[in-house]
Image: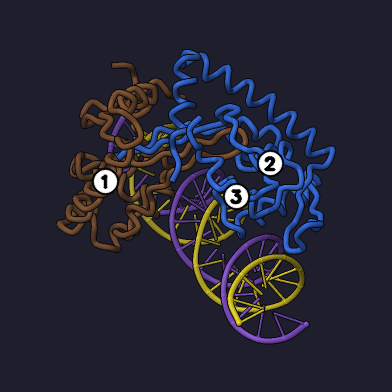
Chain colours: A brown, B blue, C purple, D yellow
Amino acid sequence: MAQSALTEDNSDTDAPEFGELDGIVGFHIRLAHGAVYRHFTETFAALGLTQKQVSVLWLIGSNPAVSQIELGSRLRMDRATTMTIVNRLQERGYLRREKSSSDGRKQSLHLTDDGEEALEQAKRCIEEHEAWLKSRFTSDEVEKLVEMLSRIHE
Amino acid sequence: MAQSALTEDNSDTDAPEFGELDGIVGFHIRLAHGAVYRHFTETFAALGLTQKQVSVLWLIGSNPAVSQIELGSRLRMDRATTMTIVNRLQERGYLRREKSSSDGRKQSLHLTDDGEEALEQAKRCIEEHEAWLKSRFTSDEVEKLVEMLSRIHE
DNA sequence: GCGGTTTTGTTAGTAAAGCATACAATCTTC
DNA sequence: GAAGATTGTATGCTTTACTAACAAAACCGC
């Protein structure tokens, strides 16, 4: 598989395996004179979650004990931005921080039971979205699109 | 051609023809656990313009006397958001507002000479971007992508 | 024509995302 | 051990986008 935009800095020896393309949550494509826009925040809005927050829950759920810096790197956020999002999810009781045992600087992020629950609900929203996608595009087309995306990296 | 997201409310009798897909300025596709992201703001940054501002200039340039509400509708912005962007471009001398003669509520938006000049420069940036696109995707793929986009509407 | 409703533009306030900076704690390197 | 790099944190700023409220103009039913 071609190097994807999600796996370009896999230099950590003990880094968990990220990088599978699980599905398209939403997209936003801007043409020269406008934006073709499909926004799925509304879909998650019923859960009171933004796309970014769902991405964070998803990533922690599939990679427990991930650090904030790793999380930010995967989701293209700097440390400050990561802080605000992690803080908010922690305040809502969806995740907890622990000191990493191997590296005292790092936080080790874990979902709480409430966080797992929220992620499950979000995944159901994503399934609905995939139904929407499939109503407009064939599975071959979606696959082709995702494959094309994997060719995009800085 | 299938109804596109850019032409869904063509109820105005004297509405100018929108809807041609002129080129992809940038896109941002969010996967469930992250974002594949390509941001072309940097390309326009040399001009001191954002993607949105370029879209506004482009749309006014190709549709003089467009109203703010129409502009916002095309670019998926509400009235307040449209205001701030139009205000900033007006402050920079790139466009001017006139009272619409046919409807006293509406503003009629026009590019100034400086605005036309800025748009020309932005179009050159877009051409450079298209070269970038073509280096990663075949022209068939780009065509297919744009065609798929045209199938996206609410 | 008149009164109520809708549309359009405007302003103000708010929230989120993102960034830079500064700082403290920890790790790494020499 | 000292110097430098990494990670998390706190603060402040900017941009984007939204809601709510308001005014002026247009529209609609009568």
Kindly indicate whether the residues beneath marks 2 and 3 are on one polypeptide chain.
yes
| Count of marks overlaid on the render | 3
What is the x, y in percent for residue B136?
Answer: 47, 16
Q: Is residue C21 above or below residue A92?
A: above
| Residue B49 position in % (x across, y down) | 67, 39
Give the quadrant of residue D28.
bottom right
Labels 1 and 2 in the same subunit: no
Residue at 69 percent across and 24 percent down: it is B124
What amino acid type is highlighted by mark number 2?
A: Pro
Residue at the disc numbered 2: B16
Name the residue nearer the viewer: B52 or B142: B142
Say which label, 2 or 3, has the lower sequence index.
Answer: 3
Residue A120 shows up from this direction: yes
Look at 80% across and 58% down and name the residue there: B99
Q: Which residue is mark 3?
A: B11
- Callout 3: chain: B
Q: Rate crowding at label 1 as few (under 14), some (14 to 19) or many (20 or more) other CA atoms within 10 Å.
A: few
Say which amino acid is labelled 3: Ser
Q: Position of residue A136 (x, y in %)?
A: 35, 35
Residue A96 relative to residue D2: left or right: left
What is the number of the mark on residue A128?
Answer: 1
Q: CA distance from mark 2 to mark 3?
A: 11 Å
* Residue at the spot 51% in from the left edge and 29% down from the top edge: B1
- Residue B149, relative to residue A48: is it above or below? above
Q: Among all residues in the image, which is located at the extreme right? A: B113
Q: Please say if the residues under marks 1 and 3 sit with CB atoms less than 8 Å apart.
A: no
